[in-house]
Image (cartoon, helix red, strand yellow):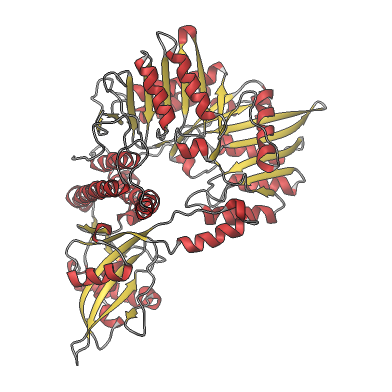
Amino acid sequence: MTTDTADREGPFLIRELSLLEFVRRVVAQAERDTTPLLERVRYIAIVSELIDEIYQVRVAGLDERLEAGFEDLQKRGIGPGELLHRIRKNVSEICEHQSGVFRAEVLPALERRGIRILLWEDLGNEDRRHLTEVFHEQVYPVLTPLAVDPAHPFPYISNLSMNLAIMVSEPETGIQRFARVKVPPILPRFIEVPGRKWFVPLEQLISAHLHELFPGMEVTECHPFRLTRNTDYQIAEFETSDLLEALKSELGRRRRGRVMRLEVERDIDPDVLDLLMRELDIEDRHVYRISGLLGLGSLTTLADLDLPELRWKPFPPVVPARITGKYDFFEMISRGDLLVHHPYESFAASTAEFVHEAAHDPHVLGIKQTLYRTSSDSAIARSLVTAAELGKQVVALVELKARFEEQRNIERAQALEEAGVHVVYGLVGLKTHAKLCLVVRQEDGKLARYVHTGTGNYNERTARLYEDVGLFTKDPEIGADVSDLFNQLTGYSKQKSYRKLVVAPAEIRSFIIEMIRREAEHRDGHVVAKVNGLVDDATIEALYAASQAGTRIDLIVRGACCLRPGVPGMSENITVRSIVGRFLEHSRIFRFGRPERGLRYYIGSADLMPRNLDRRVEALFPVEDMEAQKRLEEILDLCRADDHLAWVLQPDGSYEPRRQRNDVNVHQALMERALERSRALRVR
């Protein structure tokens, strides 16, 4: 697998190219014979979704910098124009590789199991007759062919939509006309042939019946195409009196963002391509010629086929051992902190149940909750509504600006408000990304505060796929800290420091750097960190300095990493691993020190990236309970031992699979240990 990640000189790797290295690792998951077949299909789809997001946000930002005349990126020694060229080269390679894996490996494997994706010309007469009926009954009524001529301007093409570019000829004059047909996103992308698991792409079905859309005309060309637009946005929060209305307005404008990428078939007619480029006002650098089907992200529908034998063996998350005891949640937490690990342990039986019990407990006076991303049918949101209806003081901080979740969060906020929940949107100019739930309870004539915090969102659906940790505690200092933080988020508090919490944007970067510096003062200094992204220059420079002082640094960074490990004299004591497998690694865990002189553990919501450290409200929590620390140590140990799912970052920015020595698959090991704990509980 070729790669063009970064220059070999300079201390920092480039974020966008590092992100694309992560996409390559996802493609590799689709190549593995050990990955179940429909999961291979899902990984192919995820690759397309990741590239879409990179273009909508990262490439869009670089394109704006190029237009504004910025010459280079800070401390990277590369201009936006050159970087956009290198992104294009990498993406072209990745898409060609993805399409090749799909065509040469995944499609034949599907066909061996009776699952086929067919073109119209591959079908027999009987199947064509049936699909023609489907076209007339379900497809034709929702199609709208749009002509382009002096009376009909070129139509607006929506972001991520699949379209057909069509040339028709008038029989009498031979004059060529252009028309566009949008492939309706409301319909399934793949139409099933009855009685078999055969599927025809919707655009193929439409293409085969274009004569019915243009009667009396001759269809001479038909080519699918797909757009990706700039969906990034900026809201002048300090200048608006209503953030909700400002965001609604901005979302409307975002749908019409500038075109960042045009995907077309490799053999598209040059005249049709020229017309599209001219009308869309794009250059050749925006055009991507694809071999095979466009928009492979829609393959998720096939990955969801009801064929459990072709997917991961189901793993029902276990109920954490202490929760299955004889105590209610509040008595259980009073006896000691509880750490839970998703998806190995049940989110529904722990976090969602905690909020549910709080909503119904007559001794609970109030609940305060942050909501960044939630599922569409959120049990936690329902519990907050119930609590409000029962007269409790309920506050929900809904982050309206959570990327790609804006519309859902607007609707969620309005529904909660209508039910009587006090809804706030956080601080002007900052996203609230901290994961916090505070429950205030009357106990023996006093008020007690119970806290849940975690590394993942309060989202039941993703909690079955994302690896995260959560902590329940009754620690009075943490409870007081979280109360103070909520007061800052909902009122005019100017709180800057806390008893045990470390909060961004004021403190987390300086705290992490100070903890790294302290380890560098010891001969046997040791830092272990597990994050999703490491991009922050100041943090990377602190890690380099610690490495040069002899500190051992073990990093587990799933996605983008701008630190260059293994460079003599700079970072030879640093290793960086990325775990890519069945579950999405999402937890943020920090460990400082060595057992013989004491270890300090922290979990939190923040990655080591400028956006998290400077532009978001994030919270980092100490984990002081011995049993909880053992659980964190187990996670970190298994991640470092893994040699099935782990990739090792090289000094040039590329990644290599870790050579197998330990025969450890961290996801499989954690599933087995969760089941062992559950079985041990039943025996007792």
The answer to whether residue 524 is above or below residue 49 is above
Q: Quadrant of residue 494?
A: top right
Which residue ends up furthest to the right in the rendered image?
445
For the image, the number of numbered tags is 0
Q: In the depicted view, which residue is nearer to us: 479 or 419?
A: 479
Confirm whether residue 361 shows in the render: yes
**Can you say whether 302 is above or below 325 in the image?**
below
Quarter of the image holding residue 543?
top left
Where is residue 268 drawn, in percent x and y? 19, 66
Left or right of 460? Residue 643 is left
Image quarter (top left, top right, bottom left or bottom right) of the N terminus: top left
Q: As rendered, which of 395 and 243 lies closer to the eye? A: 243
Image quarter in which the C terminus is found:
top right
Q: Nearer the viewer, residue 281 or 366?
A: 281
Looking at the image, can residue 194 be seen?
no
In the rendered image, residue 330, in percent from the top left (x then y), is placed at 68, 29
Residue at screen point 50% across, 52% down: 405
**Percent position of residue 26, x then y:** 30, 41
Above-or-below relation of 618 to 444: below
Which residue is more in the foreground, 491 or 668? 491
Percent from the top left, x then y, of residue 532? 41, 35
